[in-house]
Image (cartoon, rainbow, N blue to C red):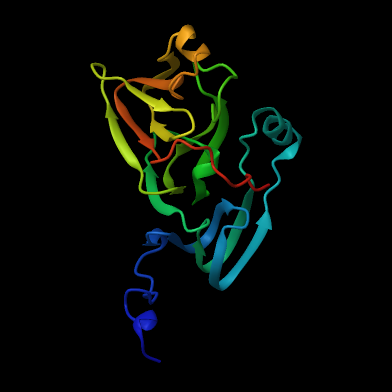
Amino acid sequence: MKGDLFSSRHMVQPTTAPGMTVENAKCIRNAVNGEMLARQGAMVAYRGNLAFERKSQGVGGMLKRAVTGEGLPLMTVRGQGEAWFALEAQSCFIVEVAPGEEFTVNGRNVLCFDATLSYRIATVKGAGITGGGLFNSVFTGHGKLGLVCEGDPLVIPVSPQYPVYVDTDAVVGWTAGLATSLHRSQSLGSMLRGGSGEAVQLMLQGEGHVVVRPSEAPPHRPQQH
């Protein structure tokens, strides 16, 4: 068979290493030998001896999801083989978490991750319960975390001299060591007059990096459960 579709640009190549890799800009491949976790419904193809099972979050997890709206609808992938994961052709990238490190990410951006990572749902400190996307998943342990983003993400350094202000609907995640709080960039009078549409941002201070998606609008799709 000939044609551009069957060129090396699109053809899947043999696996050269176990674990998670970016197959292309819109898809992540995981060479599974044991167990991993992924967002429910995110598997687009697999080969080998793999089993997929919905992961129960228990009563506590269900209650937390009901309160925060942030829970991760996960499935466990077990066995030996290869699986490909994607979410509506969003851009894919991988974060490697080392022992002692911590990465905070919005649940809507999580695609898949190694079973050696653990996560908890946490309130963004200083943000209270107002605004959007202010409950996030905090990953710790040792392993790889596959993420999706609508468009190519921006990674912005944060330093003590230069805090970064991010729209609460645009933030994807940030590294450990950053303090968060809500920042109001408009006066009450300006807001009453219609404002600029940029009333409140998430302010990050300290030493680290923040990941931002190139869009302020909330995701147009409902979160899968």
- Residue pictured at 64% horizontal, 65% vertical: 51
Provide residue 169's location: percent of width, then percent of height: 49, 33
Q: Quadrant of residue 121?
A: top right
Screen quadrant of the N terminus: bottom left
Q: Is residue 193 above or below residue 83?
A: above
Q: Is residue 174 above or below residue 153?
A: above
Q: Is residue 75 above or below residue 122?
A: below
- Residue pictured at 44% horizontal, 16% vertical: 181
Residue 44 versus residue 131: which sits nearer the camera? Answer: 131
- Residue pictured at 64% horizontal, 46% vertical: 73
Provide residue 140's location: percent of width, then percent of height: 46, 36
Q: Quadrant of residue 122?
A: top right
Q: Tell me how many marks there are.
A: 0
Provide residue 210's location: percent of width, then percent of height: 35, 32
Residue 167 versus residue 145: which sits nearer the camera? Answer: 167
Q: Residue furthest right?
A: 59
Residue 117 visible at all: yes
Q: Quadrant of residue 164?
A: top left
Residue 49 versus residue 47: which sits nearer the camera? Answer: 47
- Residue pictured at 46% horizontal, 54% vertical: 90
